[in-house]
Image (cartoon, rainbow, N blue to C red):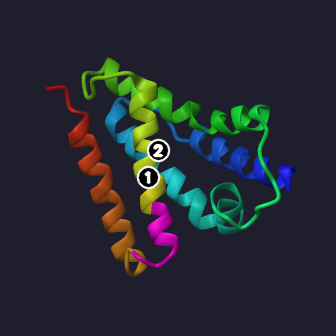
Amino acid sequence: MREVWLEGFRRLADRMAAVPHTDNSLDDLAELGRAYRGHALDNRAFYEIMFGDAVTEYEPSEADQAEARRALDALVEGVRRCVADGYAAGEPEELAMALWGLVHGMVSLELRGLLGEPDDAARRFDLALLLSALGMVPR
């Protein structure tokens, strides 16, 4: 079960790392969110093992958890770019964790059919990304 759990995070890390960097770091950050969503929709079984209660007999070690957190490296870097470009203010790792929670929550709702039909779910997901971007704007 450990290898399946880690494979899910490897796939997520690969998907996030594949998001290209453009000259608009805020748009790139939104694409990272969409990559996370795409990973979950394309790898539902892995996603449930990674984050759900599908497997109760496996408890990730600290080393496993550290490897899984590598999937967030692209997100932290994306937030760091937004901070450097003036789109966001704050500690990049803290902002990234908050964004991860938002995106994870939206994806979890979608996977359980609570965001409506696929087109509605995609629109609501993008709305959440927009609202999170507004919340990061320096005051």
- Badge 1 marks a residue whose secondary structure is helix
Q: Determine the image quadrant of residue 118.
A: bottom left
Disc marking residue 100? 2
Magenta region: 107-114
Which kind of residue does numbered mark 1 sit on? Val
Is residue 120 or residue 139 the one in the foreground? Answer: 139
| x and y, in percent, of residue 135 in the image | 23, 39
Q: Is residue 97 left or right of residue 54?
A: left
Question: In the rendered structure, which amino acid carries the disc numbered 2?
Answer: Trp
Q: Quadrant of the image for the C terminus?
A: top left
From the viewer's perspective, is residue 72 above or below residue 4?
above
Q: Position of residue 57 (x, y in %)?
A: 82, 59
- Horizontal relation, residue 10 to residue 92: left or right: right
**Place of residue 4 in the rendered image (x, y in percent of width and height, measured from the top left):** 82, 55
For disc 1, the neighbor class at 10 Å (few under 14, some 14 to 19, many from 20) is many
Residue displayed at 64% across by 48% down: 12
Q: Main secondary structure of the magenta part?
A: helix
In the picture, measured across the screen, residue 63 lies left or right of residue 99, that is right
Q: Are marks 1 and 2 in contact (CB under 8 Å)?
A: yes
Whole-angstrom CA distance, mark 1 to mark 2, is 5 Å
- Residue under pointer 1: 103
Task: Residue at 49% x, 26% y: name it.
Answer: 77
